[in-house]
Image: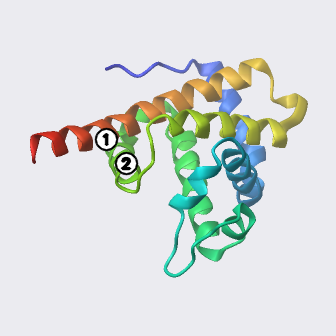
C-alpha cells in the first residue's frame, strides 16, 4: 500500500516544529507518555522492568528504565523526521517495531491513543505555533509510521495463525 505523501510545506512544518521539540526530548516524551497513561491507564502495566511492578503512573514515569524507553521513542520520532524525504527507508525497522509491540501485549487500537498523545505533547510544547496545518502534517507523518508498524503487528498475528 502506497504511503500518503507529505507535501513540501508539510515536511517543512514538521522539521521546524521538531527543531523546537527536540531541544528537550525527554521532557516532551514524558508529556507524551503522561497523556497516554491518562487516556489508557492500563498501559502502565505493560512496563514492568526486572523486579519493578509499577502500580502508579508516576513511579513508572520516574524510573530509569522508563526514561530509557522515552528516549527510544523520541529517537524513532527523530528518525521519522530525518527521513521525511524517504519514509520507506524506515519500513523494515517500523515493521519489526510493530511486531515487538504486539509481542509485549500492545493492542493495535493503542497506536491511535499514542498518536493523540503525540499531538498533545507537540501542542503543549509549541503552543500557538502548533497550527492546524502543523497538526495535519504531524497526523499524516504519524499515520505513515503506524501503517508500517501495523503491518508488523498484523504479520505477527498472521504467522501465529498459520503456525509459522
Answer whether labels 2 and 1 touch (C-beta < 8 Å). Answer: yes
- Crowd tier of the residue under label 1, counting other residues whose Cα lies within 10 Å: few below 14, some 14–19, many 20 or above: many
Horizontal relation, residue 39 to residue 52: left or right: right
**Measured from the top left, where is residue 110 in percent x and y?**
53, 39
Horizontal relation, residue 1 to residue 41: left or right: left
In the image, is residue 20 above or below residue 127? below
- Crowd tier of the residue under label 2, counting other residues whose Cα lies within 10 Å: few below 14, some 14–19, many 20 or above: some
Tally the numbered discs. Answer: 2
Based on the displayed image, in which of its 4 quarters is residue 160 positioned? top left
The residue depicted at 75 percent of the width and 37 percent of the height is 120
The residue depicted at 34 percent of the width and 54 percent of the height is 103
In the image, is residue 109 above or below residue 79? above
Q: Nearer the viewer, residue 79 or 70?
A: 70
The residue depicted at 66 percent of the width and 46 percent of the height is 36
Quarter that holds the N terminus: top left
Label 1 sits on a secondary structure element that is helix
Looking at the picture, the colour scheme in use is: rainbow
**Measured from the top left, where is residue 48 in percent x and y?**
52, 69
Based on the displayed image, in which of its 4 quarters is residue 12 positioned? top right
Q: Which residue is mark 2?
A: 102
The residue depicted at 61 percent of the width and 26 percent of the height is 139
| Outermost residue toward the left in this view | 163
Q: Nearer the viewer, residue 42 or 9?
A: 42
Based on the displayed image, in which of its 4 quarters is residue 100 positioned? bottom left
State which tag comes first along the sequence, 2 or 1.
Answer: 2
- Mark in the foreground, 2 or 1: 2
C-alpha distance separating marks 2 and 1: 8 Å
Label 2 sits on a secondary structure element that is helix
Q: Which numbered marker is on residue 152?
A: 1
| Outermost residue toward the right in this view | 128
In the image, is residue 140 above or below residue 36? above
Q: Which numbered marker is on residue 18?
A: none
Amino acid at each position: 500500500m502506497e504511503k500518503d505523501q507529505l507535501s513540501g510545506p508539510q515536511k517543512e512544518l514538521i522539521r521546524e516544529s521538531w527543531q523546537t521539540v527536540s531541544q528537550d526530548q525527554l521532557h516532551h516524551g514524558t508529556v507524551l507518555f503522561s497523556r497516554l497513561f491518562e487516556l489508557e491507564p492500563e498501559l502502565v502495566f505493560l512496563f514492568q522492568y526486572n523486579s519493578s511492578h509499577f502500580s502508579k503512573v508516576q513511579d513508572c514515569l520516574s524510573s530509569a528504565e522508563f526514561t530509557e524507553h522515552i528516549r527510544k521513542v523520541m529517537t524513532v520520532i527523530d528518525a521519522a523526521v530525518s527521513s521525511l524525504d524517504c519514509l520507506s527507508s524506515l519500513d523494515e525497522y517500523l515493521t519489526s517495531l510493530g511486531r515487538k509491540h504486539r509481542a509485549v501485549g500492545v493492542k493495535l487500537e493503542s497506536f491511535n491513543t499514542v498518536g493523540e498523545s503525540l499531538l498533545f505533547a507537540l501542542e503543549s510544547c509549541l503552543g500557538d505555533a502548533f497550527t492546524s496545518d502543523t497538526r495535519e502534517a504531524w497526523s499524516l507523518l504519524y499515520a505513515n509510521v503506524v501503517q508500517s508498524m501495523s503491518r508488523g503487528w498484523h504479520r505477527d498475528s498472521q504467522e501465529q495463525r498459520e503456525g509459522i
